[in-house]
Amino acid sequence: MSYFKRETMNMDTPKKYFTLSIDDGVTQDLKIIEILKKYNMYGCTFNINTGLCGANWKWVGDHIGRPDVTHLRFTEEELRGGIYNGFDVVVHTLTHPSLSMFDNDPNSIRKEICEDAENILSITGKKPIGMAWPGGDTEYTEKTIRLVLEHTDIRYARATTPTNNFNFPDYFMKWMPTCSFSDNNCLDLAEQFISAECNDNMLFYVWGHGYELDIYHSYDKFEKLVKLMTNSKDIIYVTNTEFYHLFKDVIPSWKD
């Protein structure tokens, strides 16, 4: 597996791309980062809510009958300490609302997205142009998408409905992943991706939340996924933002 170098890549040759996307900025990300660094795998994008720094969502574990599972976000001090150094950090909105609530309130959309982006810029030194939709695919509409494009600098947004395939997205603002790392078929898809003939460009896009690895006791599964990808010489890892920049001229953000 290799990290892409745009200046040396032949974009006319079909390639296999792998990327990860992880939501919420919770403390389980520390173990995820440890695994990623073990395999020198930096093709991962973290989507964080800077208006919720230090928030303890105890209800998440309680809701699933697992009070032992924490959902504790990093504090601002921890974020500024460099937890995500070397990784891509983008918007998950300031406070994780359903953005469709603001389909008639563009100022609130602007606040939720732009303030989160400004905070991320202050923390990382890099201005994010991407996001993950908070709450999943029921929490935004086509109108929401158009408002985000009109009132913010966001140009790609990850959704949650799995495609279970390796196709490129039709639109960057409704970027469907291949699967979650908690899906039962994740490792099967990884094996299919590795063995597939690469006659056209392919993308294996895996997403999830760090706390899910505690719920399902699946850190070993996650590590196996990363190991499979890094042991495959013909797979190129990219962050979500890097993939966007590679293909923004051929994949539109949204419908005309």
Image: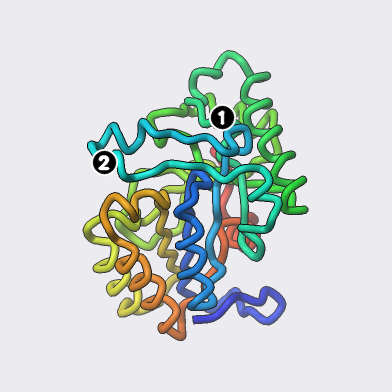
Marks 1 and 2, how far apart at CA: 24 Å
As drawn, is 198 to the left or to the right of 244?
left
Residue depicted at x 43% and y 59%: 205
As drawn, is 122 to the left or to the right of 3?
right
Residue depicted at x 35% and y 70%: 225
Residue depicted at x 38% and y 29%: 138
Q: Amino acid at mark 2?
A: Arg
Res. 171 visible in picture: no
Residue to which mark 1 is pinned: 95
109 w.r.t. 79: above or below: above
User: Hey, which quadrant is residue 246 in on the image?
Assistant: bottom right
Q: Amino acid at mark 1?
A: Thr
Q: Position of residue 134 (x, y in %)?
A: 48, 35
Q: Position of residue 23 (x, y in %)?
A: 48, 47
196 w.r.t. 102: above or below: below
Residue to which mark 2 is pinned: 66
141 w.r.t. 14: above or below: above
Callout 2: SS? loop
